[in-house]
Amino acid sequence: MRKRDITCSAALAVASAALGLVAAPSSASVPGHHVVRPGGSIQRAVDAAAPGDTVVVLPGTYRESVLITKPGLTLRGTGGRTVIAPPATGTKAAGACAAGGNGVCVIGAEGRTVDDVSISSLTVSGFSGNGVWASWTDGLTVSEVTASGNGTWGIAQERSTRGDFRRNTATGNGDAGIFVANSVDEEGGAIDTRGTRVTDNTLSDNRIGITARRVRNMVIGGNQVTGNCSGLFVVGDESKPAAGAMTVTGNEIVENNKFCAATERLTALQGSGIVLTGSEKTLVRDNVVRGNAGTTPHSGGIVLFKSFVGALNTGNTISGNLVRDNLPADLADRDASGTGNTFVSNECGTSVPAGMCAE
């Protein structure tokens, strides 16, 4: 074949691939790279992968749950057109992840964490439990994932460290859009998350946008939180170490005015922006908190409230926030026995007690 013909053929091949006219390479043709097509099984590809491999899921709806227990694995979709949904009604759940009603699970064990897993660019929707569920992990990254209409949490992590949750969308989930906790089934002191980050996410129409429960040493920043019953909860109790020692910064928490009825653990929620309960040494700065209005105990813009078991807030700093048009108050310190909590340079209209807004 002449050189000119070879060049033209190569150009045509590249153009055809770009238009989707040529099939993507199979997992056999690219070592460490596994491609799942509509009608295929994501779990089968994950099981066949070695630690450090990448599983790419092409556009389509995949009715299954996916369990990841291998370190370094990357599970990547192709954006919103890659959808993981529950099996059809009447189909028996297969595997531990499905048995819990969850969509994608990353599960390790005490003393044997699953490290450096990445999940990105897909939708997990309609599961009775959680969209993405992680336990005993280190360095988990969840990015550009949409978690919608799941029964409990959209994206959740327990007993884990150094998580990175960024640019995700969580909407219409039964509890928190993003949930980070020490443990969901045991009491105990807050764990050091070693710098877990919840950043640049969009959270709407959930019970709570973000919950950080009995954890320490994390950043919650740059998130858009609106239309939930409550925007953000930092939750602690009387256990030691206390929850807190985190930074909440640069978030926009606006009109979280949906009403949610009381549960066994929590009173009814409506109109809460940022709530600290039983937290210590948390810095809440440079956030925009607007239009959160309600008549429940936690209603208001930025609220300090004693924890569900009576633990006090201590040593928290609320500074440089724009807090406007929240009811019954922009700033509310309802933890009268808490100590060392300071409100500095916040632009607001009302506070309880009075005098906490910058002049």
Image (cartoon, rainbow, N blue to C red):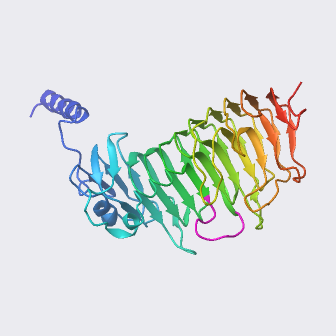
**Residue farthest to the top?**
359
**What residue is at 32 percent from the left and 40 percent from the top?**
81
**Who is closer to the viewer here, 303 or 192?**
303
- Badge count: 0
Visible residue check, residue 196 = no
Look at the image and give the residue range highlighted in magenta. 181-190
User: In screen coordinates, is 42 left or right of 215?
Assistant: left
User: In the picture, residue 29 is in which quadrant?
Assistant: bottom left
The relative height of residue 146 versus residue 161 in the rendered view (above or below) is above
User: In the picture, residue 299 is in which quadrant?
Assistant: top right
**What residue is at 40 percent from the left and 56 percent from the top?**
103
**Who is closer to the viewer here, 320 or 165?**
320
**What residue is at 57 percent from the left and 74 percent from the top?**
110
- Is residue 187 rendered magenta in the image? yes
**Residue farthest to the left?**
1
**What residue is at 30 percent from the left and 60 percent from the top?**
45
Q: Main secondary structure of the magenta part?
A: loop
The relative height of residue 115 versus residue 353 in the rendered view (above or below) is below
The relative height of residue 287 versus residue 136 in the rendered view (above or below) is above
- Is residue 300 rendered magenta in the image? no
- Spot occupied by residue 80 in the image (x, y as percentages of width and height): 36, 39
Visible residue check, residue 124 = yes
- Spot occupied by residue 106 in the image (x, y as percentages of width and height): 46, 62
- Spot occupied by residue 341 in the image (x, y as percentages of width and height): 87, 47
User: In screen coordinates, is 26 left or right of 352?
Assistant: left
Look at the image and tell me in which quarter the N terminus lies. top left
- Spot occupied by residue 95 in the image (x, y as percentages of width and height): 35, 69
Look at the image and tell me in which quarter the C terminus lies. top right
